[in-house]
Each structure stands twice: as structure tokens, then as C-alpha cells.
């Protein structure tokens, strides 16, 4: 923490400020680290579905932590991704585009050596249709996903099929935006 803080205080370099985004902001504005560093996506159902949820992304020193809850799913696994565009104009969610993948890697699972940056794998709903989850993603760039979409799919992501894991239609979508630190 000390080195991050000194970078922020002495840092006239825009690049070092960017690299320490969130943490340095939080420290210099006097808020707790968590406040400046959290984004949220509120998931709303696509047409014909009633799946809803909330997903938080938090910048940590060496990873992005993802914590969330999604309700009204069918029991079992559901593909869970960050898609390219935070555009919900199409009622079936297709306007969110494909998986977020600035490096144009193949589709895969979050633990594969190469995968789309937006490949978060699956979330698992219990018999009541609720999925509660927490994951830590080491190779996701926190700032690059702001304004993009979180998508939950009707089916399971097989983590292999191209280009999107054969996870079926989109049942809920939400745009990743800055979380209100007072909430
Ligand atoms: Cu998806
Ligand atoms: Zn993918």
C-alpha cells in the first residue's frame, strides 16, 4: 500500500496514475479503497424471461473480485460472460455483441491459458433458481470492462465451443457502471 500511495502522491505521470486506478484515487480522495474501486451491473431479464441479479466488480491489488447473486434461473449451470457492448437496445440482449475480447483470443474458461477476457465461466443455480457466487480474476483489466455488459445465458458454457461456449440464449443482461459508494 505504501508504494502505491507514494506513486499516487508523487505521480505526475498519467500512466502510473492509470496503472493504479482506483486505489490511488481512493487514497487521495480520502475514501476507503473499496469505494473508488467498485463497479456494479444490475441484471434485468431479456424478453420472455424473469431472471434478475446484481454483480459487483472490485479492483483488488492483484485481481478483480466478482461477487454477485442472480435469481429466477433454472437449477444448474449458466454461462456467465462480459460482452463487448453495454448496449441493451435489443430485447433479446444480442445488441451486447460477442464476448469481450480485445486480444482476440479463442473462447475458453477463465482458468485456461488463453480465453476471451470476458469469459467468466458458469454460475450455478440451486434448486430454488438462485446463484450466489464469488470469483477472483487475475487477468481481467478492471477499467477496460466499464460500460460493457454482463450476460447470463439459459444454458451451460462448455468452455470449449467457438465462439461462445454454446451457452444458448441470453436470459439477463446488465451494463457495468460505477457503483454508488454510499449504497
Ligand atoms: Cu455470454
Ligand atoms: Zn468467450
Image (cartoon, rainbow, N blue to C red):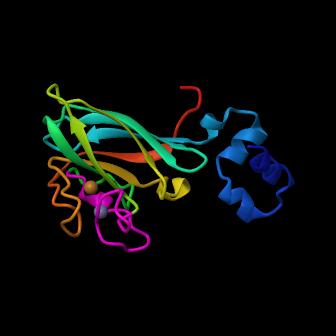
At which x and y percent is residue 168? 14, 55
Task: Find the magenta span and give its range.
Answer: 92-116
Residue 99 shown in magenta = yes
At which x and y percent is residue 67? 41, 37
104, 52: nearer the viewer: 104
Residue drawn at (20%, 34%) of the image = 125
126, 169: nearer the viewer: 126
By secondary structure, the bulk of the magenta-drawn segment is best described as loop
Task: Answer with the quarter of the image where residue 86 lies.
Answer: bottom left
**Is 15 situated above or below 48?**
below
Q: Is residue 34 left or right of residue 137?
A: right
Q: Is residue 96 left or right of residue 39?
A: left
How many numbered marks does the figure carry? 0
Judged from this view, the residue extending furthest toward the bottom is 104
Residue drawn at (32%, 40%) of the image = 43
Q: Is residue 152 left or right of residue 56?
A: left
**Is 20 situated above or below 100?**
above
39, 50: nearer the viewer: 39
Task: Answer with the quarter of the image where residue 116 lies.
Answer: bottom left
Residue drawn at (83%, 49%) of the image = 6
Task: Examine the rendering and report whether any part of residue 136 can be seen.
Answer: yes
| Figure quarter occupied by ligand 2 | bottom left
At which x and y percent is residue 143? 55, 55
Residue drawn at (15%, 47%) of the image = 154
Task: Answer with the quarter of the image where residue 104 lies.
Answer: bottom left
**Is 149 situated above or below 42?**
below
33, 47: nearer the viewer: 33
At which x and y percent is residue 147? 46, 53
Amino acid at each position: 500500500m505504501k508504494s502505491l500511495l507514494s506513486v499516487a502522491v508523487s505521480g505526475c505521470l498519467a500512466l502510473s496514475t492509470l496503472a493504479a486506478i482506483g486505489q490511488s484515487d481512493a487514497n487521495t480522495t480520502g475514501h476507503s479503497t473499496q469505494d473508488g474501486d467498485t463497479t456494479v451491473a444490475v441484471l434485468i431479464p431479456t424478453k420472455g424471461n424473469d431472471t434478475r441479479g446484481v454483480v459487483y466488480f472490485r479492483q483488488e491489488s492483484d485481481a478483480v473480485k466478482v461477487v454477485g447473486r442472480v435469481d429466477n434461473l433454472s437449477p444448474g449451470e449458466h454461462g456467465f460472460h462480459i460482452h463487448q457492448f453495454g448496449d441493451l437496445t435489443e430485447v433479446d440482449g444480442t445488441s451486447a455483441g460477442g464476448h469481450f475480447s480485445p486480444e482476440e483470443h479463442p473462447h475458453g474458461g477463465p482458468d485456461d491459458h488463453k480465453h476471451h477476457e470476458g469469459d467468466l465461466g458458469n454460475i450455478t443455480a440451486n434448486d430454488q433458481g438462485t446463484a450466489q457466487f464469488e470469483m477472483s480474476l487475475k487477468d481481467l483489466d478492471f477499467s477496460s470492462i466499464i460500460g460493457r455488459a454482463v450476460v447470463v445465458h439459459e444454458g451451460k458454457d462448455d468452455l470449449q465451443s467457438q465462439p461462445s461456449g454454446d451457452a444458448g440464449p441470453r436470459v439477463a443482461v446488465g451494463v457495468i457502471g460505477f457503483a454508488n459508494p454510499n449504497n
